[in-house]
Amino acid sequence: MTRLSQLRSGALAILLAATSLTCGENVQPTVPTDIESFSGDGQTGAIGSALPNPLTVLVTDGSGNAVPGVSVSWAAQGGGSVSSATVTTGSNGRASVNRVLGPTPGEQTTTASVAGLQGSPVTFLATATEDVPPPGTIEISTNPPVSALTGEVFDPVVQPEVVVKDGSGSPVGGAEVTASIASGSGTLEGKTTATTNASGVAKFGDLGIAGTGDHTLEFTAGTASVTSSVTLSALPPEATSGKWGPVVNWDIVPLHMTLMPTGKILAWGKTNPGVTDTMGMPRIWDPSAGPPSGLPEIHVDDMLFCAGHTLMPDGRLMVSGGHRQDDAGIKTTYFFSANGAPQKGPDMANGRWYPTVTVLDDGRVLTMAGRNEAGTVVTTPEIWENGAWQALPGAGTLDIPYYPRNFVDPKNGLIFYAGERIQSRWFNVDGTGVGGGRGIWTPGPSHIFGFNRDYGSAVMYDEGKILVVGGAGNTSWGTPDPTTGTPTASAEVIDLKQASPSWQSTGSMANRRRHMNATVLPDGQVLATGGTQGGGFVNISQGNAVKAAEVWNPKTGQWTTLASNSVMRIYHSVSLLLPDGSVLHGASGDAMATPTVPVPAERNHEIFQPPYLFKGARPTISSAPSSVSYGETFSVATPNAAQITEVRWIRLGSVTHAFDASQQANTLSFVVNGGNVEVTAPALPRQAPPGHYLLFVLNRNGVPSAGKIIRVQ
Ligand SMILES: [Cu+2]
């Protein structure tokens, strides 16, 4: 092939590439004809360093219009490198690389070429100077902290900043400054080098020192250096055990509890029929406005005790069913605004006492199980769609017990019933099941634990990953499955995103627990709180109460025992993740252990501060959008951007009866971009059903920011 024909075939390939880009858009194909330097020519930098600005070329057609989709070849002469050997022009016709200079002072060239284009190759000239800085000075403009905790990631305001100048006092740009420990036995952590900007300023972003005692930090640029002192303290014991706060009183047993999108907490308890006691009515509590005693009651005409509830995509709380008498429910539907204003909705076809309510990926809401007005188990779920309830009789007569531990499967959008029964199952609200009716069950994998896990808990701690833990211990629980009189300490996990999901063993808790709660924490671990080691429906022996919290690490599968709270919290206890990263653990009681013996009524809560709140400075979120779309990449502004190693969101909790029907967390992908973290929302609603989430950014110690409430839709 002649050189001319090579050029022609090259140009033809480019033409085809450019044509395919515009295919289907009714745009005339554009033919690239010219390449020219756009920016980055004539820069100066130290040998071996990156030039401050990228090198950019522009590809145009015969009319001077930018042409996208053209592959540009880059080459560095005289050593050093370009960031990519080929770069395709973007929609603005431009292609850029970053250039690291070679080792020889003087002029160094970089070429950008496209065969067949006029102007190719484009040559960029750069001047490489002797290594910087020349003999000069380095000064600290922001000192590291005088004192810090071992391993603490220093707060941004005390991340060190230094200024480098040359012998004549002019700022030196592009100089590399290295931080090191000049004295002391600790280890410097984080990124230990920083490059000066044009003003000669180098700012560190995520330094910390693991160690204790006095340390000297040294900053070196060339031959110049400067030091600063930091004294490190050991972590407090709470960094290992966490810490419980005091007992805080309510006027009710707050056994139904939801974190509303306003950051307020809506809760209610039980009102005893025939008694002029309305203490169970809902209350809404703003934690920033004082304690929750003395709150006005929110009057509703129905008894919402033992209803199911979850937050709908629009931020209202849906409440399904309620209390007619023990073991018998009502058909009622209520909606509560984010500020707690009640609104009665249409009745369901069935009364429900102990149902579970779940938001589907398309925003519809499913209510499942419970007992009706006559005390009969309801096997027909109902779905809230287009502002009305529709019964799903295709479910047939399958007996799903109280408060089924239901989740949305991110793989197929179906409801996944994780327990309490031994066999888990999927439910498709749009399938055709028994008798040609709407809705269908399909069998799923069985638990390893061979007994019904009544009053254990379950959480989706990451996308499609569910932990079931504890439960069992009541041989008279209404289930077709085998039962045991001893509660279990065991736990199991399943990953629904696997091709053939199955339950796997994970570590067991140190304590058997029935009537426990499990709560996903901002660091992705799962907290277990409360419960009893004793068997029977509800064992009120103080000696059997489990007060030690435990935390499960999904990376190791192991549980760690943490600090103990002070109040026995068993049947009707709740745990709720709060925006500040602490966990409210409260209630218990408002029920009878036997027909004659009440469970102690705990009209109070305690707040647990997990260990991550005792490891030094926390990242902060200065701004984030209040609403994002699926698949959207959104900016979270944080002064700690350089420190962020993990981003997670957790759906606002709505908890009762040992189960939070909204426990769903996603680990989110992100990139750091200057003072922002650019976070990408899950692509599909079934990965994170629409609604409100607490967004956390975390540093390398697993220390979370406070959560920012954010809606995805
Ligand atoms: Cu109950």
Image: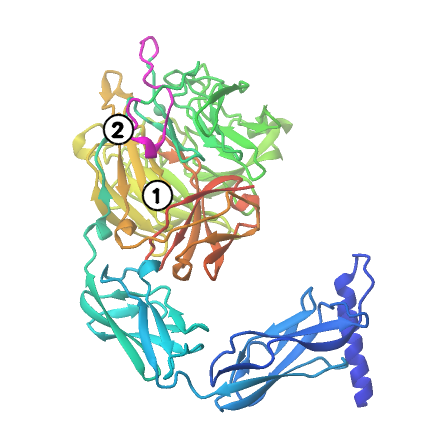
What residue is shown with label 1?
580
Asked whether residue 494 appears in the rendered view, the answer is yes
Please state the horizontal and vertical placement of residue 11, each as a whole percent of the image: 79, 78
Q: At label 1, which amino acid type do we have?
A: Asp
Q: What stretch is highlighted in magenta?
A: 273-294
Choose the circle earlier in sequence order: 2 or 1: 1
- Residue 247 is situated, as x and y percent measured from the top left of the image, at 22, 32
Secondary element at tag 2: strand
Answer with the quadrant where ligand 1 appears in the image.
top left
> Which of the pair 298/406 is nearer the observer?
298
Asked whether residue 61 is drawn in magenta, I would say no
Q: Kindly identify the amino acid type of the residue bearing the numbered disc 2.
A: Asn
Q: Position of residue 304 (x, y in %)?
A: 41, 20
Note whether residue 503 is visible. no
Does residue 87 appear to the left or right of 584 in the view shown? right
| Mark 2 lies on residue | 604
Residue 219's image quarter? bottom left
Q: Does 110 appear above or below 372? A: below
Residue 74 to residue 584: above or below: below
Q: Does the magenta stretch include residue 282?
A: yes
Q: Residues within 10 Å of mark 1 (few under 14, many from 20)?
A: some
Q: Which residue is drawn at 82% across and 57% down?
A: 26
Percent x, y of residue 357: 48, 30
User: Under tag 1, what secondary structure?
Assistant: loop
Mark 2: few/some/many CA within 10 Å (<14, 14-19, 20+): many
